[in-house]
């Protein structure tokens, strides 16, 4: 038997979106039932992507877990660059790029245990994500540097696009 929690809860930021979608669905159903049915389908899709997914995370402190649903598009080692708004003195880091799709949950989690060292929102554009290099450079992004219990630095970068504009982080440094 499947319980409600198997589907995940709704992120707090998702409730206003779902409420608006529900009102629109009801109004469209009164106008034309097929439109209401279509709107209901969109509302179910929104509920799917605005959920907090149930994830089983290993308790091993040396494990790095994917912070987001999606497809890994690249893994590379990178030096600290001039456009990064982080504290000095961090060693080179691995950069793992995960592209989320329209059917993936749009909530990201910390990939490691530790504390938030930096949390910056860098204003920018909302271009499409087709050109990853341009999007990484020009689009609005949130850079979060985590420090593990072992002193390792892990950076998560959320890049806004035309369809994904909210880059919310509930945790500040510390």
Image (cartoon, rainbow, N blue to C red):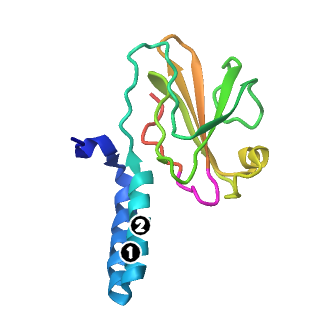
Residue 98: image location, x then y, percent? 62, 37
Mark 2 lies on residue: 41
Quadrant that contains the N terminus: top left
Residue 62 in the image, given as x and y percentages of width and height: 49, 12
- Residue at the front extreme? 1
**Up-down: is 169 above or below 50?**
above
Label of residue 28 in the image = none
Left/right placement of residue 75 relative to residue 152 reads right
Q: Which of these two is toward me, 55 or 19?
A: 55
Q: Count the marks: how many?
A: 2
**Residue beneath the point at 36% across and 64% down:** 18
User: Does the magenta segment cover residue 165?
Assistant: yes
Image quadrant for the C terminus? Answer: top left
Pinpoint residue 88: horizontal percent, then vertical percent: 68, 23
Give yes or no for contact between labels 1 and 2 (Cβ–Cβ under 8 Å).
Answer: yes
Numbered disc 1: secondary structure: helix
Quadrant of res 158 = top right
Give the residue number, with chain letter if any, for mark 1: 37
Q: Residue at x 64, y 55 (%)?
A: 161
Q: Which residues are magenta?
A: 160-166
Which residue occupies the extreme top position in the image? Answer: 150
């Amino acid at each position: 038997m499947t319980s409600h929690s198997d589907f995940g809860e709704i992120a707090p930021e998702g409730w206003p979106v779902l409420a608006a979608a529900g009102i629109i669905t009801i109004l469209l159903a009164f106008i034309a039932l097929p439109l209401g049915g279509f709107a209901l389908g969109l509302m179910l899709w929104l509920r799917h992507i605005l959920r907090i997914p149930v994830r089983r995370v290993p308790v091993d402190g040396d494990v790095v877990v994917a912070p987001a649903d999606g497809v890994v598009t690249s893994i590379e080692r990178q030096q600290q660059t001039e456009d990064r708004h982080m504290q000095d003195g961090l060693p080179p880091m691995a950069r793992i790029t995960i592209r989320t799709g329209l059917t993936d949950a749009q909530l990201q989690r910390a990939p490691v245990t530790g504390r938030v060292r930096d949390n910056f929102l860098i204003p920018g554009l909302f271009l499409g994500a087709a050109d990853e290099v341009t999007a990484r450079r020009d689009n609005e992004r949130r850079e979060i540097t985590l420090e593990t219990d072992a002193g390792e630095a892990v950076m998560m970068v959320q890049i806004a696009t035309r369809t994904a504009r909210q880059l919310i982080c509930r945790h500040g440094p510390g």
